[in-house]
Image (cartoon, grey):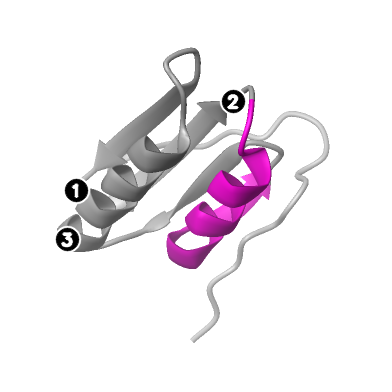
Amino acid sequence: MYVILVYDLTDNKNRVHKLCKKYLNWVQNSVFEGEITVANLKILKIEIKKLISDNDSVLVFDSKHRLNLNKDIIGNEKNCITNFI
């Protein structure tokens, strides 16, 4: 599964950032993306819920295949993600 995760938090930004980096690639500021298993995504969501408050917002966009998602970058790509085999 391919996921894009975006958050807007009042507190615990560093803790959520560290948690997301364990599962996804950091793209820029509060944006992460990458391949993740369904089980790990469930774990990530549970852990995030423990760290955020009622005023915080986390958006998770998912697709079964990365090929079903187009990404256009306008301007400078902050953290270029390349997968070399």
Q: Position of residue 68 (x, y in %)?
A: 28, 41
Q: Of residues 70 and 41, which is closer to you in this image?
A: 41
Q: Of residues 56 and 74, which is closer to you in this image?
A: 56
Q: Residue at x 67, y 47 (%)?
A: 14
Q: Residue at x 19, y 48 (%)?
A: 64
Q: What amino acid is found at the position of numbered circle 3 in the picture? A: Ala
Q: Specify start and end residues of the magenta stretch as a single range.
A: 11-27
Asked which secondary structure carries label 2, the reply is loop
Q: What amino acid is found at the position of numbered circle 1 in the picture? A: Lys
Q: Of residues 70 and 43, which is closer to you in this image?
A: 43
Q: Is residue 12 left or right of residue 49?
A: right
- Give yes or no for residue 12 being in the magenta stretch: yes
User: What is the CA distance from the residue labelled 3 to the residue labelled 1?
Assistant: 14 Å
Sequence order check, earlier mark of 2 and 1: 2
Q: Are marks 2 and 1 in contact (CB under 8 Å)?
A: no
Asked which secondary structure carries label 1, the reply is loop
* Mark carried by residue 39: 3
- The quarter of the displayed image where residue 8 is located: top right
Q: Is residue 59 left or right of residue 11?
A: left
**Callout 3: few (<14), some (14-19), or many (20+) C-alpha neighbours within 10 Å?**
few
Is residue 67 in view?
Answer: no
- Give yes or no for residue 14 being in the magenta stretch: yes
Q: Is residue 20 above or below residue 76?
A: below
Which residue has dot 1 on it? 64
User: What is the CA distance from the residue labelled 2 to the residue labelled 3?
Assistant: 24 Å
Q: Residue at x 35, y 33 (%)?
A: 60
Is residue 75 in view?
Answer: yes
User: Which residue reaches farthest right?
Assistant: 76
